[in-house]
Amino acid sequence: MSAKLSNLGYMAFKKQTDKNVAVTPNVYVPLYKESLMTKVNLDADNPIAGNKMATFQHIQGQRDHMGDLQVLAEPTTAGYILDMLLKKGTTSGASDPYTHPFTLDPSDPNAYTVDIAKGGVVFRFIGVEAYELGHEFSDNKMLFNISVAARKSFIVREIASVSGTGGIEITLKTNYDPSPTTGLVAGDIIRILLADGTTQDKVIASVDSIVKVTLTVGTTGVNDGDQFYLRAATPSFSLVTPFLWSRTEFRFANDAAGALSATHTPLQSGSEWKLQHNLEENEGSKLSGSFDPADLVRAQGDAEFNVKLRFDTPEDMNRFLTVQKRACVVRHFSGDNHELRVTLNNLKFTESPVELNTGEIVYAEGVLKPEYDASDGQGFDVKLLNAVSTI
Amino acid sequence: MSDEKIKYQNQSDLPQTLVGYGKVLPGQTIETSGPIYNPNFVLVDNRRLVGVEGPIEQPKVNQTLKGSKK
């Protein structure tokens, strides 16, 4: 088994029209680390059965598909990530830059198919949605930290039988799921690993049923038990300059409208926002009748905002002590006219420690929590300006 | 396989920097010595070479190809 460098893999995604039906991803984003995986959640059975062994048998449990993704925060791809977390409103603009608004809305966000190429195998996750979006700056560039859950996955299946002229029809085993072809799309490129260690690369012509696919070209020598999986495509990227710490501005005022045009307040590294659109259960709804989650049910939204700045005057300390409203618009710029704009309409300081340490500058490290602002009709929103006309 | 080049067109709305090939503008075609499997690129003129498999449903190229290298 040969060694495979992580950097030879990739992450790609595409919006689904049906939250349970996969599409072939075509938007590639630079990936830094990920932990998205399927958990089979084995049911360890321990009955009274005439022996002392702690586990009598393992029974297939109800699965969940969760993990974290760290990707480059960049204008062209950021909209799709926000589309997994929040409700996208109507895009405005006749040309670049297009403005895409995202809000915490009773309507659900969209679901995406996400392919992650690892080694020689593509791990496909279907119906992926995000429930938390944070960020950090690695040197000067911004990275998104995304927590996601998926409804299904396609990683590898075993072949049950081969039929049709030239072995063009493949029937998959149902030992993983009663519907083993779920997640495959006509046109997908696949690889078959035979028992002798050789491989055959094919393309799916059609997904004929929940157990059978037809290939464009037949197979040779493929048998029961051979492995069937997605293989890596050649990635392509459509990127512009990512969001940078050096082009990030924090603008504060007594309300959001004033904050948008307020003078930038330079803050220390570590100042950051985090948005949440919670799920009822991050693992998904484990209802009867399926090994996979039946749905990802949305609950409430929230946000966190931390600021670190040099302390010399007491205005923020007064706001903390008297629980006064503060609004902030965080603007991340890219190029001449692209921007990620996070508006936090009504913030209250929950903590504002100012500590003295010998030899160090005096800093205030405020923790602010947003609340619903009745006059603005929201607690936060996000606007993305980029060159993509349709997200 | 013969020395014949395979032509692909960028069918997306955005420029694509294809790993191993470089930047390809929307609608631009490239020639490769081997098959490319990327959902943003389609075989030009619905061609299918022996031993080369492309996307199953290929959109008809009705517009004048702009910026073709060949």
Image: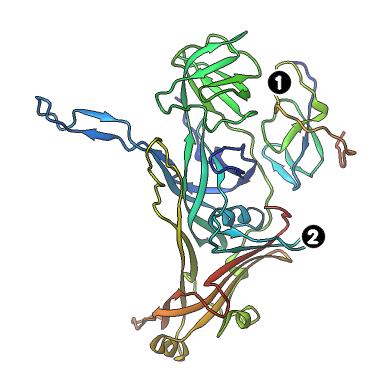
Outermost residue toward the front?
A288
Residue closer to the observer: A80 or A371: A371
* Mark 2, residue position: A95
> Looking at the image, is A368 positioned above or below residue A121?
below
* Mark 1, residue position: B52
> Looking at the image, is A192 positioned above or below residue A235?
above
Type of amino acid at the residue the image marks with label 2: Ser
Residue A164 placement: quadrant? top right
Q: Quadrant of the N terminus of chain A?
A: top left
Residue closer to the observer: A77 or A154: A154
Display coloring: rainbow
The residue marked by circle 1 belongs to what chain? B
- The answer to whether dots 2 and 1 both sit on one chain is no
Q: Residue drawn at (87%, 38%), measured in percent from left and top? A: B65
> In whole angstroms, how far apart are the C-alphas of marks 2 and 1?
38 Å
| Residue A320 percent across, percent down from the top left | 41, 85
Q: Residue drawn at (73%, 66%), measured in percent from left and top? A: A337
The residue marked by circle 2 belongs to what chain? A
| Residue A168 percent across, percent down from the top left | 60, 14
Give the numbered dot on residue A339.
none
Q: Residue drawn at (52%, 43%), measured in percent from left and top? A: A127
Residue B25 placement: quadrant? top right
Residue closer to the observer: B11 or A358: B11
Type of amino acid at the residue the image marks with label 1: Val
